[in-house]
Amino acid sequence: MADNDLALMAHLLRRAGFGAARSELEEYAAKGYEAVVEELLNPEDSPPVEEDIIDRYYGGEAPTIWVGKWFYRMIGTKRPLVEKMALFWHHVLATGINKTEHLPSSGGQIELFQRIGMSDVRTVLLEVSKDPAMIYWLDNHENRKGEPNENYGRELLELFSMGVGNYTEDDIKNAARAFTGWTITQPIPLYPQGHFKSEFQFSQGDHDEGEKTFLGHTGNLNGDDIVDIVVKQPATANFLARHMYNFFVADEPQVPAWSVEPPQDQETIDTIVKAYMETDGDIVAMLRAMFNSDSFKNAQFKKVKNPTELVAGVLKLVGTYRFPEPGVVAFGAATTLMGQTLLNPPTVEGWHTGKEWIDGGTLNERINFAVNEIGDAGKPGIQDIINRLGAHGGSVSPEEFTDKALDLVGPLPVDDKTHAALMEYAESVGSLDFSSDEAREEATPRVIHMLQMIAATREFQFA
Amino acid sequence: MVRPHGLLRAGFPFLKTLGMRRITNFPADVAFGAEGRIYILLRTEVDAEIRVWHFDDAESLTDQLIGIGGLGKDDGKMTWPVQIIADADENLFVSDEALHRITSFNMDGEFVANWGEQGSEDGQLNGPSGIAFDADGNVLVVDTLNHRVQKFTSAGKFISKWGSFGSEPGQFNMPWGIHVDELGDVYVVDWRNDRIQKFNSDGEFVFEIGTSGNGDGQFNRPTGVAVDADGDIYVADCGNNRVQMFNEHGRYLQKFLGDATLSRVARNYMLTNAFPNRLRDMANLEQEKLLRSPKSVRVDAEGRMYVPDYRSYRVQVYQKEAIHLTEQQLAPPLRAPTLQTV
């Protein structure tokens, strides 16, 4: 297969998933781009993650354990887009466990996104309006007839669907009134028997049955009606399409700037919007339009990896955790050091993305994580790279060594300066010899060092 | 050992709850010592410990919160402990499916030995889980990822093995718990085949119980098995959040869904915590008594059944009430059900 086919497939799998080991990448590439897009968009055709295996081996209910199990899913799933969409919605419909302090609700929200994240926008917005983590996070449990709390109504319009400038303050007030009485059941407290679930509860007595006018619609509107009206708005299609573009295609400015700063690529966003409007907000249709667009295909390495993508991608590369093994709790801690605590986005806006992921401290953490993971020659993914480098059993020149290593890590294109630096190292150690076990043993630390240098490049930080 | 001719099953009431969050976090198994001592094996991704408790649950016997082991890989540490058993001298043996070894401690909690290494050759282990003593003091180990049972001396010398991967009688798919009854028969939880298999002491297949499902006598990823002196069989049906009970022939008798009350330590805690008391006052407490993912079940010599209620941080204890019947007190077996009632 052509190198560009492999590079394009690697790009798709980095964006629609969390990367791929080389053998996995080759299997996907053999199927062809559009076929793989369809495979990703139809996860029910691939086997699910084996939940019984996860439950058997990973015990405990601390958030770090929950997040570790999510990483296990990201790495091993045959349905990577399901997990990627859960991460997408986690970013867009952000709630934080620092406020809920309730893992069944905060983790349950991600599980909700895993179930419905590829359904349609109406389902997502309606279900998240009934989601205990969201209700508590935005105080809708305090939203009662006669004493409305506008938090949820405001954020639903501002950050979850239409964006600033497409509604009035009166629309917010009336949306809030429509969601009065949408509350949660009181869970049994953490002590002494651990967490128990909270569930959505409609409290009729707290619901405002009065007439409301919202975006030109008047009546005794309930929360369902608000969602129905919202999802029909072109502004919602535009706003969520821009979110998708920002998450999957290329970095946009931060969300608060969207009302004043136009998208860098309105044409692609229009393509996604068109799919939305033609299908009443079918998420798979939007994703299909996006993944098959030329601008997506041409957007290789135009996005800074978020910390979750970086960590999961490195783990895919090194080939560990294909079956449960201890240590998953480390991954949530790692992304926290890189600026992304899963289950706990900093605000209702989610995380700031793009170059804001990178500063002196987080870059150091990103590189250290990758370098440490790659540093173990016993890991199956590293073994595979070494085997592929030495597949012909003879000598590998410095240039071949450099280019093959870049290919096997990505394929990862690098600029001349980076290439020259890698070449300098390769030349300093000379040709690699794979003609015997002893020679291979001698070559191994050099290969690892090269891979670590690649992981420390500027280019490796991009998806 | 002779089994009773028959039983008058008078009842199986709930007896008590032991432990709470912080004290008995995620109990995976229990073992019994003398004078009512109970060793509760705790396992999460961030902890691995044996909590020494007492059936009487008296504060004076438990307030030191004695723990054995700890999370790690070194001697005397555990990473993914699965089951615990105690020998007559109260030496404790713990299987560790991450470290592929059996670790033993004496009753003072001092490390004694590790044995086992990862592999699939005779005597090697891959993810050991269930462990049980046979009548000779040998240790039967469920070698989960090798889909077999291996027998060792208590010092870890390989004796024999049986089983292979599959779903036919005598085959396993990631087996878990194990029990050797007083007659020497062996019961193995065939976890991913959703069944229990009974073998004689030579490892020859005798019968199996269960299919996949949530009906009576069906299982959803069972974990532990125990057999009492009457031959009754108890199965921790983890995925269905219950324990099921069968007679010695494998006929379904009843199920236990959980009846927990607040333990002594839980009550003491709640009496000094006003806010959670208010929350409890607002909550539906019905679900609180139910079992959540029981990872094992054990019975002691007094006919008590202990269920490590994994996700509820406690152990639920039931008391069997059964009277042995003589031949005169139990009519001969019938060939078919009858509508005659007296």
Image: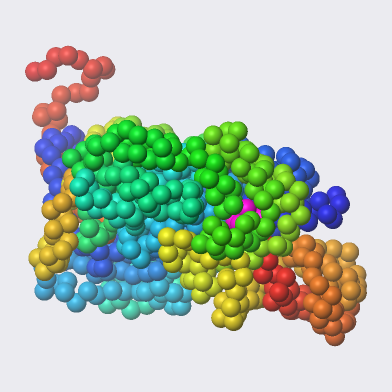
Q: Is residue B325 left or right of residue A145?
A: left
* Residue A145 horizontal/vertical position (percent): 21, 45
Q: Residue furthest top?
A: B339
Q: Is residue B97 magenta?
A: no
Q: Give the total number of marks visible in the rendering.
A: 0
Q: Is residue A306 left or right of residue A61?
A: right
- Quick check: can you spot residue A173? yes
Q: Is residue B325 left or right of residue A230?
A: left
- Quick check: can you spot residue B43? no
Residue B308 in which image quadrant: bottom left
Q: Nearer the viewer, residue A401 or A440?
A: A401
Q: Nearer the viewer, residue A327 or B242?
A: A327
Q: Is residue A67 left or right of residue A16?
A: left
* Residue B279 horizontal/vertical position (percent): 17, 56
**Rendered view: B205 above or below B310:** above
Instruction: Point out the stretch of residues depicted in magenta.
Output: A245-249
* Rendered image coloring scheme: rainbow
State the quadrant of the C terminus of chain A.
bottom right
Judged by its main secondary structure, the magenta piece is: helix
**Rendered view: A458 above or below B142:** below
* Residue B68 horizontal/vertical position (percent): 31, 74
* Residue A177 horizontal/vertical position (percent): 29, 44
Q: Nearer the viewer, residue A151 or A99?
A: A151
Q: Residue at x 45, y 41 (%)?
A: A230
Q: Residue at x 76, y 54 (%)?
A: A298
**Rendered view: B257 above or below A151:** above
Q: Residue at x 70, y 48 (%)?
A: A267
Q: Residue at x 30, y 51 (%)?
A: A140
